[in-house]
Image (spheres, coloured by chain):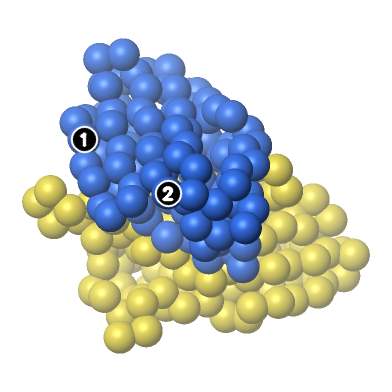
Chain colours: A yellow, B blue
Amino acid sequence: NAGVTQTPKFRVLKTGQSMTLLCAQDMNHEYMYWYRQDPGMGLRLIHYSVGEGTTAKGEVPDGYNVSRLKKQNFLLGLESAAPSQTSVYFCASLRAQGEIYEQFFGPGTRLTVL
Amino acid sequence: GIQVEQSPPDLILQEGANSTLRCNFSDSVNNLQWFHQNPWGQLINLFYIPSGTKQNGRLSATTVATERYSLLYISSSQTTDSGVYFCAVEVFGNEKLTFGTGTRLTIIP
């Protein structure tokens, strides 16, 4: 049981390049989330998904796209990277069962856009 | 949107000391969680506590929903408690968490 994994762990891009971040979970959770964390700030929600084939915008969705083609995977895409997207990106999935309500986070992806 | 404020922003304590971290929120919530981010960046869920009191070892949390605040207590601090503690809340029907800016706790041996 690997929990939530993220690929890659680090990446450096040039302005205008594109890339896809992969999040995978093996806990059969319906809800998945993408956050970004900037220095001195809490996590801000980019996009989320409440189940396979669904996606919704979060607090800071501009410049990002997502897809949830399979229940276990949630992809975050940057079509044309900008320096403002330099950040640490976290994926999470949600276990919601009765009184239990817990988000599990991946280890993060550190992205630098030059 | 909902505002989540955490205090203090920074806290430096000697090993063995007790601490209280506070989270204030500006609207009624149906979900409140406390997280710990360790110095390596890993985020761990500590408590799901929309109301009432819970305890887990040296950590406990209390949420007074009617007064819109939550407290996280850490007793007999250890160096491994160092890191950033985040409070996150969800407004009814919103399906997503809003995070506070965190309290950075440093425990000195």
Tell me the crowding category of disc 2: few under 14, some 14 to 19, or many 20 or more residues within 10 angstroms, Cα based.
few
Residue A110 visible in image: yes
Toward the viewer: B72 or B2? B72
Front position among marks 1 and 2 = 2
Q: As shown in the figure, which amino acid type bears the numbered disc 1?
A: Thr
Residue B68 or residue B2, whichever sits in front? B68
Q: Considering only vertical position in the picture, is B82 above or below B52?
A: below
Using the image, determine if residue B2 lies above or below residue B80. above
Task: Tell me where residue A70 sits by quadrant.
Answer: bottom left
Q: Which part of the image, by quadrant, shows the C terminus of chain B?
A: bottom right
Residue topped by disc 2: B76
Expressed as whole percent of the image width and height from the top left, the position of residue B104 reads 61, 44
Q: Nearer the viewer, residue B71 or B49?
A: B71
| Pick the front one: B45 or B106 | B106
- Mark 1 closeness class: few <14, some 14–19, many ≥20 residues within 10 Å: some
Residue in the picture at 82% in, 72% down: A13
Q: Are marks 1 and 2 on the same chain?
A: yes
- Residue for point 55% across, 52% down: B15
SS class of the residue under badge 1?
A: strand
